[in-house]
Amino acid sequence: MSTSFEKMDEFVNLKETELRLGLPGTDNVCEEREKVSCCNKRALPSEIESSTRKSETSPPRKGQIVGWPPVRSYRKNNIQTKKNESDNEGQGIYVKVSMDGAPYLRKIDLSCYKGYSELLKALEMMFKFCVGEYSERQGYEGSDFVPTYEDKDGDWMLIGDVPWEMFVRTCKRLRIMKGSEAKGLGCVV
Amino acid sequence: MREDNLEMSENVERYLQLDPRSAAISQPPSSSSSAAAFVSPANKSRNCNSPCPDHVLENVLENVLQFLTSKCDRNAVSLVCKSWWRVEAQTRFEVFIGNCYSLSPDRLTHRFKRVRSLVLKGKPRFADFNLMPPNWGAQFAPWVAATAKAYPWLEKVHLKRMFVTDDDLALLAESFPGFKELTLVCCEGFGTSGIAIVANKCRQLKVLDLIESEVTDGEVDWISCFPEGETQLKSLSFDCVDSSINFKALEGLVVRSPFLEKLRTNRFVSLDELHRLMVRAPQLTSLGTGSFSPEDVSQGEQEPDYAAAFRACKSLVCLSGFKEFTPEYLPAISPVCANLTSLNFSYANISPDMLKPIIRNCHNIRVFWALDSICDEGLQAVAATCKELRELRVFPFDPREDSEGPISEVGFQAISEGCRKLESILYFCQRMTNGALTAMSENCPDLTVFRLCIMGRHRPDHVTGKPMDEGFGAIVKNCKKLTRLAVSGLLTDEAFSYIGEYGKLIRTLTVGFAGDSDMALRYVLEGCPKLQKLEIRDSPFGDVGLRSGMHRYYNMRFLWMSSCTLSRGGCRDVAHDLSNVVVEVFGSDDDDDDDFTRDYVETLYMYRSLDGPRKDAPKFVTIL
C-alpha cells in the first residue's frame, strides 16, 4: 500500500516542473493521471479518457458539478446501458467481486481485460493478495486464495478453466475463496 | 380506511386488555418531564364511582376522534385544550414524523401510547445527490429500540432516507409479532440478511416494499426464508435488491400467496421467469417486470406466449421495470394497455417508434414515467392519447449537464395542450421557453407539483435569450393550487419576487444556481406563507438573506443551503437567537482540522427540534 502512495507523491512533485500542452490552470489531465496511477497503470492521454469513464472513481469532467443534474445514483446506475443493437462498442460487462473475509464488494468491468493474466493481476491489486500457480490439473497451488466465479448455470468454477471468451460470456460474478473451501474446487475439474 | 382504524384500535385494546369504555383512565404519561407539552391528568377520576362529567366528555370525544385520520386535523384537535390533547394522544394510531431529529424517540412514546403505524423520514433530500457526506445520521436504531418496548402491537413502519441495519430489522422482526407492513424508501445500511429475518419472523407480513434502497448483497437466499404455508402477502417489491434471486423459491412463494396484488421483481428475473409468475398470479394489479428480456433464446424451444399471460391479468393497472428490456417483446404488454393507470418506462431506453404503438392504447393512464429517449415526438403521442394524465415524469437518459437533450419546450407544450388534468410534472431538458411555461400555467390549472430541471445551468429562454423569470412567474400566478416548486434555468431576483408574492400554498421550494442577491431569498422568506421545506444550492445568498427568515424558521420543517455565501458567524447568530432550532454546518468529510478558523460555510442544514441538538452527530458536523 505504501509503495503506491510513494509513487504518487513522486508523480505529484514532478507535476510542478512538467512541461504540458494544457493551458495554465487546467488540472484535469493531471487529476486523471493521478487516479490512473493509483492503479499502477501508465496510461497514454488517449487511454485516460476511456479508462476514467469506466473506473468507479473518475473525476467529474470539466464543468461537471457534484449532484447536478439532480438524478439519484440509483436511477443513474439502473438506466439500461445497452443502447441500440447497432452499438458495437459494447458497454461494460460489470460483475461483482467478493473476497472471503473482506467486508465489501467491488465491481469490475470484464471487458477491460484481454485475458486471465490481466484480470488476475487486477484482482490481486484490488484485494491485496496473491494467487498461486495455476495448472489445469491441480488448480491454484501455493496460496490460500483461490479465484472462482459463478457461471450462468449457478455453478462455481475456477477462474481459468474455460477459454477466456466463454468465461466473459458466462461469468455472473467472482469470488475469491479462502482456505479449505477453495481446495475442494480444485478437484472438481 | 375507517375499518382499518376500528380494527386496529380493537387490536390495541385487546393487547392492552383495556375496556374501551374506560380508555380515558388508562395509564397517564409520565409527568417527570418539564416540557410544557406534558399534561398531568386529573386524579379525581380514580375515585369516582360513577362516570364524572369529564369522563363522559372524554369518552364521547374518543369515539368521535377515532374517525379523524388526517394528521393535520389531529394536530389541530390536540391544540384545543389539555383534555382534548390527552384524548387525541390516546387515539392517534398513526404517527408521521417528517424529520427524525425534530424529537426524540422518548417523546414519541411518552405522548402517544397506542401507536400501531409509524412513518419516519431522515436525511434531507439533497443527500440523494451526494451533497451530504456519508454517515451523517438518521439511524433507525434508537427508534426501533424505543418502539419495541412501547408498542409491541406495532404493525406498520414506513421509513424514508433512514439508515437501517440488519440488526435493526432483526429487532423489529422479533419485537412485533403482529407486524404487517414494512416499506423502506431510499434507505441504506441493511442487506439480504436483514430482509431474510423479516421474511422469516413476521408471520403476518402483508407488505414488504423495498424501494430505491441500497441493499448489500449478503448472498442470503432471503426469498426462501418466507415460512411454509399460505402467506398474507399483498405487496412484495424488491426491484432495488441488486442480487440474483432463487427463482424456484420465488415461484413457490407466489403460488402460496393468494392475496398478492403487487409484485415488483428485480432485473435478475428474466422474461420467461416473469411469464411463469404471471401465470401463477393472474390476480396481480401491479407488476414490476424485472429485466423484460428472455434468459436465452434457444432455437428449438417454443417461446412462451407472453401476450397471453398479460391478457390473463385482467386486473393489471400498473406496470414498471423493463430494466434490460429487449424491444421485440415490448408489444406483449399491449393487451393490458387499455386498463393501465400507471406506466413506468423510466429505466428503459425507449424510442418514439417503440412508444407510439403502446401509448396509443393507454387511454386511462394517470401516471407516466419515462426517459427523454422518447423525444418530443413521444411526448406528443402521449398528449394525443392520455387525456387522463395526472402525473408525468421525464428523466434524462444521459444525465450530464452538457448532454444533447432530446426533449424541449415542444414536447412540454404538447403535454400542456393535451393533458389538461395534469397535476404533477417533473421534466428534465436542455431547452425551454417562457412561452411554454406560460402555456402550461394556463392549460393546466390543477398543477400542484411543478419541477423543471433545465440541465445546463443558468440557461435562458432559448428563443428570446431572456431569463426564465416570466415563465415561472406565470406558473405561480396561474397555478393556484401549487404546493411544490423546483426552479432552474437563468433566474433573476424577479422570479423570486413572483414566487414570494403568488406562491401562497407552496410548501416545498427547490432552488439551484439561481438568483442575483439576498433579495431573492428575502422575497421567498417574507412571502410564501405555507413554506415548510426550503432547499437551496449554489446560489448567491448570504447572512442577510438568512436573517430575513428568523420569524419563521421554527414553523418550517427545515432549511438547507449549500454552496451559498453564508458565514460561520452569521449562522452562529441565527443559532444563538433561535433556541428551538438546531443549526448544523458541515463541508465535505475530508476537511482538515482547522475547520474552526474557516469562516465559509459549505452546507447549512437547520431544523426545529423539541429535544435540542442530537447526540449522534459525526465529526464533520458542527452544531452551532
Image: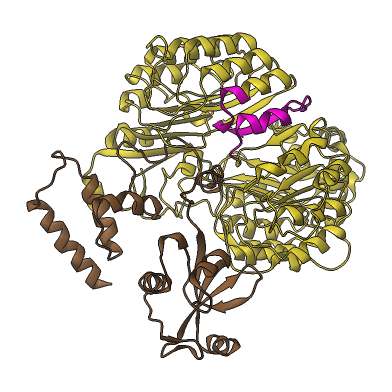
Chain colours: A brown, B yellow
**Is B508 within the magenta?**
no
Residue B53 position, x and y percent, is: 86, 34
Residue extent of the magenta highlight? B349-378
User: Where B164 sits versus B565, above or below?
Assistant: below
| Front residue of B617 and B136 | B136
- Left or right of residue B520, residue B141 in this image: right
Residue B528 position, x and y percent, is: 51, 18
User: Where B226 sits versus B343, above or below?
Assistant: below
Image quadrant of residue B329? top right
Image quadrant of residue B166? bottom right
Instruction: State the residue at coordinates (66%, 70%).
Output: A153
| Front residue of B15 and B413 | B413
Instruction: State the residue at coordinates (38%, 23%).
Output: B514
**Is B370 within the magenta?**
yes
Instruction: State the residue at coordinates (68%, 28%).
Output: B356
Q: Is residue B39 visible?
A: no
